[in-house]
Image: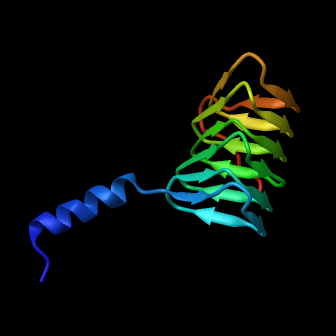
Amino acid sequence: MFSNKNKERAARTAAVSHNSLVRDAIVKGNVQSVIDIRVDGRIEGDLRCKAKVVLGQTAVIKGNIHCQNAIIEGKVLGNVYCQQLLDVRKSAKIQGDLETTKLAVEDGAQMNGACKMNLQHGPQSKK
């Protein structure tokens, strides 16, 4: 029914696919994803991702973020629990605690909260 070429194309597409919440979109409630997610809109609730989270400059999260890796350029009003690399860009504004294994912060980023580095086991995500 399906040729090997179509199966290979589908596998490549699945490997690079991600979820996205576009600018001006608003989600009221918790969001969960097992693949990468990019947010340029607004989430009023927790964001849980088993992969990478990218928050664009227009993103606003009013809730906690739990993820594997993250790039933050937007605004977070909540705690961030990142198992590997948390990359905070210069346009980011974070009001909450950070818990991660690796942290990169660009000059100009605004962070107001405690930062805990868990070098051995990653964050102890609070439920």
Kindly indicate the quadrant of the structure image that contains residue 91. top right
Q: Residue furthest bottom?
A: 1
Give the quadrant of residue 22: bottom right
The answer to whether residue 73 is above or below residue 23 is above
- Residue at 74% over, 40% down: 74
Tell me where residue 84 appears, x and y as whole percent.
Answer: 57, 36
Which quadrant is home to the N terminus? bottom left
Seen from this angle, which residue lies furthest front? 24
Q: Please give left or right for residue 113 compared with residue 99 in the image.
A: right
Query: Does residue 54 lie above or below 93 as drawn?
Result: below
- From the top left corner, tell me how far across and down residue 71 is, in percent: 62, 37
Q: How many marks?
A: 0
Residue 25 shown left or right of residue 121 in the figure: right
The color scheme shown is: rainbow
* Depth check, front residue: 16 or 41: 41
Front one among 60 and 113: 60
Residue reaching furthest to the top: 107
Residue appearing at x 67%, y 50% in the figure: 40
* Residue at screen point 69% across, 54% down: 23
Q: Position of residue 51 (x, y in %)?
A: 52, 51
Q: Tell me the quarter of the image containing the C terminus.
A: bottom right
Q: Position of residue 102 (x, y in %)?
A: 61, 28
